[in-house]
Amino acid sequence: MAELDKSGATYHSHMTSRPATEHHLRDLALLRRVRDRIDREYVQPLDVEALARGVNMSAGHLSRQFKLAYGESPYTYLMTRRIERAMALLRRGDLSVTEVCFAVGCSSLGTFSTRFTELVGMPPSVYRDQEAHTTDGMPACVAKQVTRPVRNREAQVTRAQLA
């Protein structure tokens, strides 16, 4: 319930109505469906409009609610999934950067390389040369955790702090 404080600013009281809570829970379930779809279909050409249509939301509402729920936009989440998969393919060492770019669903080598560098802290070609076979013999669940890309340009800060 929206109320005005002494300054005239609107704020929401702590009382929530049951329909609002049910609506919020329904939206969270739909957002999980979107996230799961991105996880499954990251190779496909997904855009926010198509994702929103799949859960009967507007693209703007989906983007806002997804960011509130998961801390990043659907596009950023999609690119992170693609970069995670690219890291695994590059560590194998048997594919070129271009082949990996297209194998994970990216259509622009430049965008792929830029986003990879932002998340991982080094270009994909350097990653491929330096990290090839580093997870050999490691259980897949451990390899996934230790090689997970860092979001929102944190890789650059972390590497600078380590030096």
Image (cartoon, helix red, strand yellow):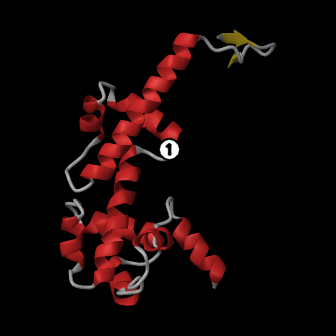
Image-based side of 96 in relation to 22, left or right: left
In this view of the protein, which residue sits in the foreground, 8 or 35? 35
The residue lying furthest to the right in this view is 6
- Write the residue at 78% across / 16% down: 7
In this rendering, the answer to whether 54 lies above or below 14 is below
The x and y percentages for residue 134 are 41, 86
Assign the N terminus to one quadrant of the image: top right
| Quadrant position of residue 51 | top left
Image-based side of 26 in relation to 154, left or right: left
| Quadrant position of residue 98 | bottom left
- Write the residue at 46% across / 67% down: 148
Assign the C terminus to one quadrant of the image: bottom right
| Quadrant position of residue 141 | bottom left
The x and y percentages for residue 72 are 47, 47
Residue identified by numbered label 1: 70
In this rendering, the answer to whether 82 lies above or below 33 is below
Count residues near mark 1 (Cα–Cα under 10 Å), then give few for <14, some for 14-19, many for 20+: few
The x and y percentages for residue 50 are 24, 36
Image-based side of 49 in relation to 121, left or right: left
In this view of the protein, which residue sits in the foreground, 99 or 137? 137
Count of labels shown? 1
Q: Type of residue at label 1?
A: Tyr
Image-based side of 8 in relation to 103, left or right: right
- Write the residue at 40% across / 72% down: 140
